[in-house]
Image (spheres, grey):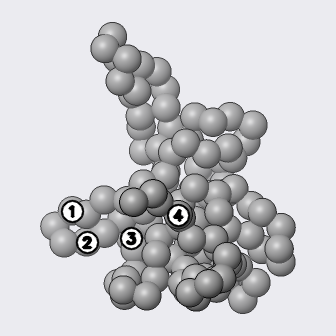
Amino acid sequence: MFNVDSTKEYGADYYAKNGTKYLRITLMIGHHPNGKPIEVTKARVMLPPMTSEGDLVLAGLCRIDSVQDPRILAIATVPEGETYGPARYAWRFDPVTQSLSGIPISNVTCAQVQGED
Protein backbone atom coordinates (compact mmCIF):
# COMPACT_ATOMS: atom_id res chain seq x y z
CA MET A 1 0.00 0.00 0.00
CA PHE A 2 1.17 3.51 -0.64
CA ASN A 3 -0.06 7.04 -0.08
CA VAL A 4 -0.91 8.90 -3.29
CA ASP A 5 -3.83 11.13 -2.33
CA SER A 6 -4.04 11.11 1.49
CA THR A 7 -5.24 7.49 1.50
CA LYS A 8 -3.30 4.30 1.92
CA GLU A 9 -5.72 2.21 -0.06
CA TYR A 10 -3.67 2.04 -3.28
CA GLY A 11 -1.24 -0.78 -3.91
CA ALA A 12 1.28 -1.50 -6.62
CA ASP A 13 2.53 -4.83 -7.86
CA TYR A 14 3.59 -6.60 -10.99
CA TYR A 15 2.54 -9.81 -12.64
CA ALA A 16 3.13 -11.79 -15.82
CA LYS A 17 0.53 -13.01 -18.28
CA ASN A 18 1.45 -15.04 -21.35
CA GLY A 19 5.10 -14.12 -20.86
CA THR A 20 4.47 -10.37 -20.73
CA LYS A 21 5.13 -8.49 -17.48
CA TYR A 22 2.82 -5.72 -16.26
CA LEU A 23 2.92 -3.11 -13.53
CA ARG A 24 -0.45 -2.34 -11.98
CA ILE A 25 -2.01 -0.04 -9.45
CA THR A 26 -4.85 -1.43 -7.38
CA LEU A 27 -7.37 0.19 -5.06
CA MET A 28 -8.66 -1.59 -1.98
CA ILE A 29 -12.45 -1.25 -1.97
CA GLY A 30 -13.33 -3.46 0.97
CA HIS A 31 -12.76 -6.80 2.63
CA HIS A 32 -14.12 -10.30 2.15
CA PRO A 33 -15.78 -11.87 5.21
CA ASN A 34 -12.51 -13.71 5.91
CA GLY A 35 -10.65 -10.36 6.13
CA LYS A 36 -8.84 -10.66 2.81
CA PRO A 37 -8.82 -7.32 0.93
CA ILE A 38 -10.91 -6.78 -2.19
CA GLU A 39 -8.82 -4.94 -4.77
CA VAL A 40 -9.64 -3.60 -8.23
CA THR A 41 -7.10 -2.67 -10.89
CA LYS A 42 -7.08 1.07 -11.58
CA ALA A 43 -4.08 1.40 -13.91
CA ARG A 44 -1.72 -0.90 -15.74
CA VAL A 45 1.31 -0.61 -18.05
CA MET A 46 3.36 -3.22 -19.85
CA LEU A 47 6.88 -3.36 -18.46
CA PRO A 48 9.88 -3.14 -20.76
CA PRO A 49 12.34 -6.04 -20.79
CA MET A 50 14.30 -6.02 -17.54
CA THR A 51 17.95 -6.88 -17.05
CA SER A 52 19.64 -8.28 -13.98
CA GLU A 53 20.98 -4.78 -13.21
CA GLY A 54 17.57 -3.14 -12.75
CA ASP A 55 15.02 -3.54 -9.98
CA LEU A 56 11.36 -2.58 -10.03
CA VAL A 57 10.86 0.02 -7.28
CA LEU A 58 7.27 0.22 -6.06
CA ALA A 59 6.91 1.45 -2.50
CA GLY A 60 7.30 5.21 -2.88
CA LEU A 61 11.09 5.04 -2.82
CA CYS A 62 11.68 7.32 -5.81
CA ARG A 63 12.30 11.03 -6.01
CA ILE A 64 12.68 13.80 -8.57
CA ASP A 65 15.39 16.40 -7.94
CA SER A 66 15.84 14.93 -4.42
CA VAL A 67 12.13 15.42 -3.56
CA GLN A 68 10.29 12.21 -2.60
CA ASP A 69 7.24 11.45 -4.74
CA PRO A 70 5.17 8.46 -3.57
CA ARG A 71 3.35 8.34 -6.92
CA ILE A 72 6.49 7.43 -8.89
CA LEU A 73 7.25 3.81 -9.74
CA ALA A 74 10.39 2.94 -11.65
CA ILE A 75 12.95 0.47 -12.84
CA ALA A 76 16.23 1.63 -11.33
CA THR A 77 19.78 0.50 -10.71
CA VAL A 78 21.35 1.40 -7.37
CA PRO A 79 25.15 1.09 -7.46
CA GLU A 80 26.81 -1.02 -4.77
CA GLY A 81 27.32 1.03 -1.61
CA GLU A 82 24.93 3.79 -2.69
CA THR A 83 21.50 4.64 -1.28
CA TYR A 84 19.95 5.98 -4.51
CA GLY A 85 20.50 5.17 -8.14
CA PRO A 86 19.21 6.40 -11.50
CA ALA A 87 15.94 5.25 -12.99
CA ARG A 88 16.02 3.51 -16.37
CA TYR A 89 12.22 3.81 -16.77
CA ALA A 90 9.72 5.71 -14.62
CA TRP A 91 5.96 6.18 -14.39
CA ARG A 92 3.77 8.43 -12.26
CA PHE A 93 0.34 7.43 -11.01
CA ASP A 94 -2.33 10.12 -11.22
CA PRO A 95 -5.13 9.35 -8.73
CA VAL A 96 -7.50 11.82 -10.43
CA THR A 97 -7.36 10.18 -13.86
CA GLN A 98 -6.35 6.82 -12.36
CA SER A 99 -3.65 6.35 -14.96
CA LEU A 100 0.06 5.54 -15.11
CA SER A 101 2.09 7.72 -17.46
CA GLY A 102 5.72 7.50 -18.44
CA ILE A 103 7.83 10.42 -17.21
CA PRO A 104 11.31 11.70 -18.16
CA ILE A 105 14.00 9.90 -16.17
CA SER A 106 16.72 12.57 -16.21
CA ASN A 107 16.19 13.63 -12.57
CA VAL A 108 14.56 10.47 -11.16
CA THR A 109 16.48 8.43 -8.58
CA CYS A 110 15.26 5.54 -6.47
CA ALA A 111 16.33 3.72 -3.33
CA GLN A 112 16.89 0.02 -3.32
CA VAL A 113 14.46 -2.07 -1.35
CA GLN A 114 16.40 -3.68 1.47
CA GLY A 115 15.33 -7.10 2.65
CA GLU A 116 16.35 -9.15 5.63
CA ASP A 117 18.19 -12.43 5.19
Residue at 25% from the left image edge and 71% from the top image edge: 20
**Left or right, 52 with reference to 94:** left
Using the image, determine if residue 96 lies above or below residue 33: below
Q: Secondary structure at mark 1?
A: strand
The CA distance from mark 1 to mark 4 is 27 Å
Residue 104, horizontal then vertical, whole percent:
68, 83
**Marker disc for residue 17:** 1
Q: Amino acid at mark 1?
A: Lys
Q: Please report contact status of discs 2 and 1: CB closer than 8 Å, yes or no.
A: yes
> What residue is pinned by disc 4?
114
Q: Which mark is residue 3?
A: none
What numbered label is drawn on residue 46?
A: 3
Query: Of circles 1 and 4, which is in front?
Result: 4
Earlier-in-chain disc, 1 versus 4? 1
Please state if 67 lies on the left or on the right of 55 as rendered: right
103 is higher (above) or lower (below) than 73: below
Residues at badges 2 and 3 in contact (C-beta under 8 Å)?
yes
- Residue 24 shows up from this direction: no
Q: In this picture, is 99 found above or below 11?
A: below
The residue lying at 67 percent from left, 44 percent from top is 3
Query: Which residue position is annotated with label 2?
Result: 20
**SS class, disc 4:** loop
